[in-house]
Amino acid sequence: MEKYLICGLGNPGAEYSETRHNTGFMVLDAFAKASNIVFEDKRYGFVAETSLKGRKIVLLKPTTFMNLSGNAVRYWLTKENIDQQHLLVVSDDVALPVGEFRLKGSGSNGGHNGLGHIQQLIGQNYSRLRMGIGNNYPTGGQVNWVLGHYSDEEMKLLQPAIDTAVEIMKSFVLAGIDITMNQYNQLGKKK
């Protein structure tokens, strides 16, 4: 059975729940809810498993805190013997407006500490789905912005993107990265 690891980046703990930096967690929660599965507290993260047309999917929300996300990703890739080509990491991105997203098959970490740590441990060759959180903050205010909560207005923009992200994850597993990028990346751009 082919296996896939989908990792949503965020920070554990109630104080970080629903913050912009936890958008990856929010996407995985939506996937789990749609799939009627629940996360269990396991080594390095909250983990849920499901299958889709004969393919096993392991969902991972690391409990290592953002800057050490690579520890959880590397551990679960190894533990489940999952090929790196079957890894998708979902993260927040200040370079994209709220409600926009980009899917890429590899590339730089774009200054994102979680992606940076994963890259340190396993390299750049993995797929990532970057969810826009906007950058409407003053100089020096990035930390407060990413650890801040979405406004109701922002959630109206974000929710459709989260719903689409769930479809993207399914397509990644069933159709692969190239077809999924071609199908969804245009949808991720604001008109």
Image: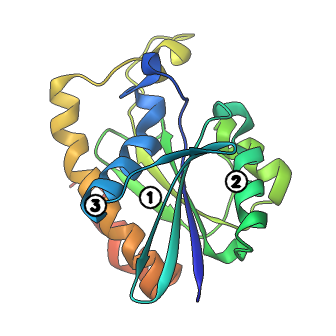
Q: Position of residue 21 (x, y in %)?
A: 48, 31
27 sits left or right of 177 in the view: left
> What amino acid type is highlighted by mark number 2?
Val
Residue for point 30% across, 51% down? 30
Location of residue 145 with respect to 176 vertically, above or below: above
Q: CA distance from mark 3 to mark 2?
A: 23 Å
Residue 120 seen in this snapshot: yes
Q: CA distance from mark 1 to mark 2?
A: 20 Å
Quadrant where the image shows the N terminus: bottom right
Mark 2 secondary-structure assignment: helix
* Residue located beneath label 1 in the image: 102
> What amino acid type is highlighted by mark number 1?
Arg
Q: Dot 3, crowdedness within 10 Å: few (<14), some or many (≥20)? A: few
Tag 1–tag 2 contact (CB < 8 Å):
no
Please report whichever mark, 1 or 3, sits nearer to the chain's N-terminal start.
3
117 sits left or right of 172 in the view: right
Q: Dot 1, crowdedness within 10 Å: few (<14), some or many (≥20)? A: some
Please report whichever mark, 3 or 2, sits nearer to the chain's N-terminal start.
3
Viewer-nearest residue: 115 or 54: 54
Q: Nearer the viewer, mark 1 or mark 3?
A: 3
Q: CA distance from mark 1 to mark 3?
A: 26 Å
* Residue located beneath label 2 in the image: 73
